[in-house]
Amino acid sequence: MANAVEIEGVSKVFRLYQEKYTSLKERVIKAGKIPFQEFYALRDVNINVEEGTSIGLLGHNGSGKSTLLKCIAGIIQPTSGQIRVKGRVSAMLEVGAGFHPELSGRDNIYLSATLLGVPVKEITARFDEIVAFSELGAFIDNQVKYYSTGMYARLGFAVAVNVDPDILLVDEVLAVGDENFQRKCIERIRVFQKEGRTIVFVSHSPDLVRATCEQAYVLDHGIVVGAGDTGSAIAALRDSLQANSQVGGTRIVDGSPEDEKPEAVHAVASVEVTSVRAVTASEESREHIFPHDPLKLEIGYRANSPTTGVGVAVQIFTPGKELLFGANTREMGIQSFDLDSDGVIEINFDDLAVLDGIYGVSVTLLDSSGNPLSWLEDRAAFQVVNTSRVSGIVALPFSINSYSVPRLSN
Amino acid sequence: MLDWQSAEEEGGEAPAKRESRDSLHVVASRIPVRARIVRIWVYRALLLSLVRKELSVKYKNSVLGFAWSMLNPALTLVVYYIVFQIVFKNGIPQFAIFLLCGLVIWNFFSASLTGATSSVVANAGIVKKVAFPREVLPLASVGSSLVFLFLQTIVLVIALAIGRDVPAFTYLPLLIPALIDLVLLASALAIFLAAVNVYYRDTQHLLEILLMAWFWATPVVYAYEVLAAPLGRHHIGWAFFVNPVTAIVITFQRILYAKVSPVVAGGAVMKILPSNSPAWYLGQLAIVFVVSAVLFVLALMVFGRIEGNFAEEL
């Protein structure tokens, strides 16, 4: 199949000035001696995205993932290399970018759709669809400045997804808006996937990428450090995060310094997860468990140096790779562990109310300030075999009964 | 958080696989001028909706609204009329119409450039978040000024009708090349200024002073021949045409004001405009056209050269 996006040897260099001189006088006075550092936001990135696939771009803050997305969108140009994009691109970097507050919702639909390069005829044809999707109804003729944040976001999203893009670029816009709106966004993205559109999705949330994308690329300091199916890419992300933690120090900001502040990471992997085992509590050794069986997770660790205040985070993933359950002792306020030798941490589930499938587990050890020390991903998968006639993911306890209600007579 | 099941259902059974478009778009550090012009053409709908936006936003929340676009030159006219006709007694017959011919041109020119210079900076929000040919922003400001030019020309035509003045019909076809020159020249400078202003915010302040000097170097409030005669005596008559706006303004005056050397009070003959043939005017306009076209291409090159860092510099 043809490639929808071909990224060839793309590098992007930012000049970081100690101070910005934007007036002529300052430039003349400081000519030739403006101090700056060259900073590679992207370094020789090569990615091909096949038509009709969904890929995720993962990375921590400052890894260059947003910069790459902006390059694909054509908002910024790479310093070297080139990107070939086939078809119409709709970039959702910010919901409602390009709206003018003084104009009505109606005028803004035309304005922002033409910004995306859509012919007026096409907008007129889709106009009702856009209004319906935005659920604005009669408010469409009000000035946008009177809209609530939610209305604004809905209209922006409605325009972005209704311009019939071949390629949809999504930055973490989904982080805004209420749950209902998020759900709507995700559903729309799924429809797009089925229709064979190409989606590039930038996120630092592995869960969201796991749920939406087949393939993922991991960026670290502007270099692609991991690629492949989502599961292995996420493992690469964890590794790159771990590598960074061990080195410590301050990270450099990427393309949009105003919304991403550098964060300092100081951590030493003093404790490592060595193994995770799912153990069925029943006597007979079986390959699988049944719904409502107890399950024990045994987390083996190695303490390289005595560490106090260690917390544990555990996540269980559904067969569909979505997060089924997550618990974090730090967030829950459960007492932390002081580890000074090798050992095992046990997590007991008394009643695992899940139905059919192979479930994945990931375990993370956290230091006393909540930063990850070490983790294992997707290991110790356990299988649940459902012998009853219900279907789904969760084995909800339920009962059914019937009783008669006397009919009211006049 | 994400409910796969319900998404499956609401997504419908099997949405038809759709064919992707084949249009290829290349993002690279250098894009040739021809490709840039093609892209601007592709985005012409955006240009129109930006012009519409500028027009509808400009006089929003003002009581008189669009009337301002006519009131503004009318009031300027009154001031100049008082100063030059009554105080200085420059003696140009039907001075109001003469003045209006030059003023509508100049207003267009100066409004285009002033608006365009700050256009990219003012639209930082979309420049940072949406991909589109950024040249459209300064061009939109030329476009909205063009609408005001037409509105003000209506005022001029009404003034002509009231004064029972007849335009020079043999020169009338020159209106078209003159307008093309004007728009091309303004667009070239607009694109250049918009790009430079991103890096040097002094540009907008510098432009104010420059436009003021430029205005007085253009025969708008005084007659062309008033300055051309002394320049000609020093054999630097061409100097007047270094300013490309001169040729455009005198063409407009020749067409609409149409008085080359009227007899003024006292029986004397006053030379106002060059008494040359339409061909001479057309020749002047042709030179301006070539100059403007070259400037336009240069402006696109400059714009393209520094556009890559707009999103970071804003």
Image (tube, rainbow, N blue to C red):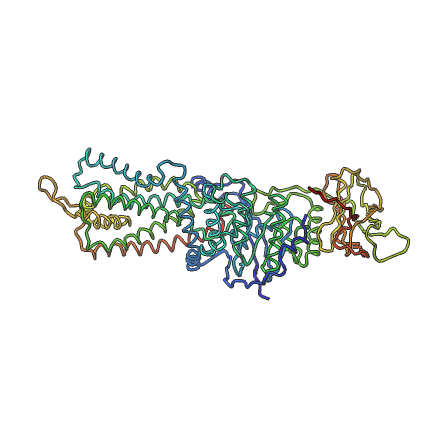
Q: Residue furthest bottom?
A: A1
Corner quadrant of residue A356: bottom right
Residue A52: where, in percent of width, then height? Answer: 60, 61
Q: Is residue B269 left or right of residue A7?
A: left
Q: Is residue A27 left or right of residue A262?
A: left
Residue B236 in view, yes or no: no
Corner quadrant of residue A218: bottom right
Q: Residue furthest front?
A: A410
Residue A208 in view, yes or no: yes
Residue A154: where, in percent of width, then height? Answer: 55, 46
The residue that appears at 33% across and 44% down in the rendered structure is B110
Q: Is residue A271 left or right of residue B246?
A: right
The residue that appears at 60% across and 41% down in the rendered structure is A261
Q: Residue furthest top?
A: B87
Q: Is residue A377 left or right of residue A149?
A: right
The residue that appears at 58% across and 63% down in the rendered structure is B17
Residue A97: where, in percent of width, then height? Answer: 51, 46
Q: Residue furthest right?
A: A283
Out of B193 and A211, give the one closest to the viewer: A211
Residue A30: where, in percent of width, then height? Answer: 47, 41
The residue that appears at 31% across and 51% down in the rendered structure is B182
Number of numbered discs visible in the structure rendering: 0
Out of A299 and A162, give the one closest to the viewer: A162
Q: Is residue A178 above or below residue A187?
A: above
Out of A95 and A256, give the one closest to the viewer: A95
Out of A285 and B135, give the one closest to the viewer: A285
